[in-house]
Image (cartoon, rainbow, N blue to C red):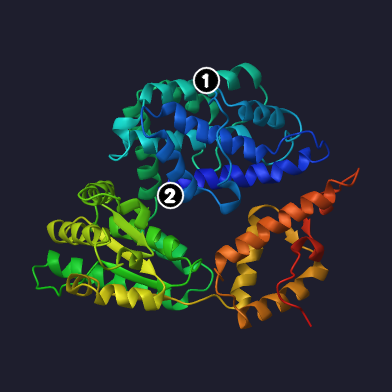
């Protein structure tokens, strides 16, 4: 998984869901999210010289929720996305006075996805870069012809419309360099102190914060001793993250990658997130090549392997080939390559015991505890504030009771922060369906989530 692609797609699809409420009064209008997903899949097909079907399949598995994976490409992939026309129209009319801007999010997503495929060692030989640039240029041309009164500011990259036009016309290598310079500039502004402050401001994770602060202090002192010519103890930079889903493991890994860069331990400090599907192929010899490509992508930064225990399945499974390739890279590139493995505590213990090389290289473990009800409430409130929304006063007490029951009776698939995100997204959808029936919607109604919107049937609140 490429985190920049994931973030861009998640932002776009969440904005589409929010905007869909504007269209619900007309039942003849197709679901805008479905149309956007169809056009994304068509884009992948258009730029693929070969392997389009497999690429689309992998994209669905990695980046789409279960509810969207059944969406298929129309019989003929369109060279221009019809959904983009609707996004532009919504930006100009119904959403003109809202904070939501759909068309720049679509362009940002196309840029990130096209860049990823164009530079991926696994995909780039099968990608037509010219078609990617032509597709992007078509979006910007349409935008410049039809939109004149919208300030196109990307939520994440601070890129205006002129910048995007320049990007679409630039050589693909310049596009990448421009993006890297922007990211590098942003990172250079964050000092160690600022990064640690970001860490300490995260909700919960008290033990994790203490462990990371201790690790940073150890590495700081090690650097000082090296500069003064004293002997230093060997401190492993590779880490094991133990915890359930949604406990902030990827967020912490991203912060550590930046901290390592600022300490001079890593050259680039990027985080490359993968799972078994991103490392293991189905034929002899291919797994080593696929894994090596991810290692090369992460060189100078951190390779973050989620659910790493799935690499160990016994028998003639190719996961062991991936493990051997990673261990060799860790041995050959001790100074500029870091690996973090993550997963549930018990399977990860078995994973580390399965290979002496794993156990010796991963001797530092950080445990991520589940969030308690107060922390879950803070996370939900953070989702609300980030979207200019709030819980109704009469919903707060009942919601807190619900969270207490939820923590006491956790389902097997409980995923902490992700559960709160899913609850928030469902509440926004329910609110949209409720408000769409009204003729006159006040600002308070637009920004308020009621207990009915939360729809909490799982656990009975006494």
* Residue designated by label 2: 3
Name the residue rendered at 67%, 80% in the picture.
Answer: 404
Closer-to-camera residue (222/164): 164
Quadrant of the frame with the C terminus = bottom right
Looking at the rendered structure, which numbered label has been put on residue 299? none
Q: Which residue is mark 1?
A: 138
372 on left or right of 456: left
Q: Earlier in the sequence, mark 2 or mark 1?
A: 2
Pointer 2 with pointer 1, Cβ within 8 A: no
Task: Depth check: give the residue in front, 163 or 358.
Answer: 358
Residue 16 is situated, as x and y percent measured from the top left of the image, at 65, 42
Q: Quadrant of residue 20?
A: top right
Note whether 430 is above or below 117 in the view shown: below
* 156 vs 239: above or below: above
Measured from the top left, where is residue 232 in percent x and y? 13, 73
Mark 2 to mark 1 CA distance (whole Å): 26 Å
């Amino acid at each position: 998984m490429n985190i920049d692609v994931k973030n861009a797609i998640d932002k776009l699809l969440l904005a589409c869901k929010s905007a869909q409420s504007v269209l619900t009064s007309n039942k003849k209008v197709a679901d805008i999210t479905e149309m956007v997903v169809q056009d994304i899949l068509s884009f992948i097909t258009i730029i693929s010289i070969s392997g389009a079907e497999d690429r689309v399949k992998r994209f669905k598995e990695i980046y789409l929720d279960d509810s969207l994976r059944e969406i298929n490409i129309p019989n003929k992939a369109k060279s221009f996305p019809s959904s983009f026309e609707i996004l532009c129209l919504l930006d100009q009319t119904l959403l003109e006075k809202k904070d939501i801007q759909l068309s720049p999010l679509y362009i940002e997503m196309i840029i990130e996805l096209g860049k990823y495929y164009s530079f991926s060692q696994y995909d780039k030989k099968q990608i037509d870069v010219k078609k990617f640039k032509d597709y992007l240029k078509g979006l910007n041309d349409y935008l410049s012809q039809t939109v004149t009164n919208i300030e196109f500011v990307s939520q994440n990259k601070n890129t205006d419309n002129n910048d995007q036009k320049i990007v679409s016309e630039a050589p693909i290598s310049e596009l990448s360099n421009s993006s890297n310079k922007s990211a590098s500039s942003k990172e250079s502004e964050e000092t160690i102190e600022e990064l640690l402050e970001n860490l300490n401001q995260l909700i919960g994770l008290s033990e994790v914060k203490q462990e990371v602060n201790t690790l940073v202090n150890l590495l700081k002192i090690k650097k000082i001793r090296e500069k003064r010519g004293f002997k230093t103890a060997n401190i492993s930079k590779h880490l094991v993250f133990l915890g359930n889903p949604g406990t902030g493991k990827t967020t912490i890994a991203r912060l550590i990658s930046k901290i390592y860069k600022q300490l001079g331990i890593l050259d680039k400090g990027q985080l490359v997130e993968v799972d078994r599907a991103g490392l293991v192929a189905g034929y002899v010899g291919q797994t080593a090549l696929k894994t090596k490509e991810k290692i090369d992508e992460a060189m100078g930064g951190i390779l973050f392997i989620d659910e790493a225990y799935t690499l160990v399945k016994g028998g003639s499974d190719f996961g062991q080939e991936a493990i051997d390739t990673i261990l060799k890279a860790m041995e050959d590139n001790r100074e500029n390559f870091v690996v973090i493995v993550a997963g549930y505590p018990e399977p990860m213990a078995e994973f580390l015991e399965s290979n002496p090389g794993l156990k010796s290289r991963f001797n530092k473990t950080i445990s991520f505890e589940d969030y308690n009800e107060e922390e879950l409430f803070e996370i939900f409130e953070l989702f609300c504030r980030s979207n200019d929304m709030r819980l109704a006063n009469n919903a707060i007490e009942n919601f807190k009771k619900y969270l207490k029951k939820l923590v006491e009776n956790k389902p097997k698939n409980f995923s902490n922060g992700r559960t709160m995100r899913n609850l928030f997204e469902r509440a926004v959808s329910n609110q949209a369906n409720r408000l769409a029936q009204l003729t006159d919607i006040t600002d308070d109604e637009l920004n308020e989530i009621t207990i009915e919107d939360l729809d909490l049937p799982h656990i009975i609140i006494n």
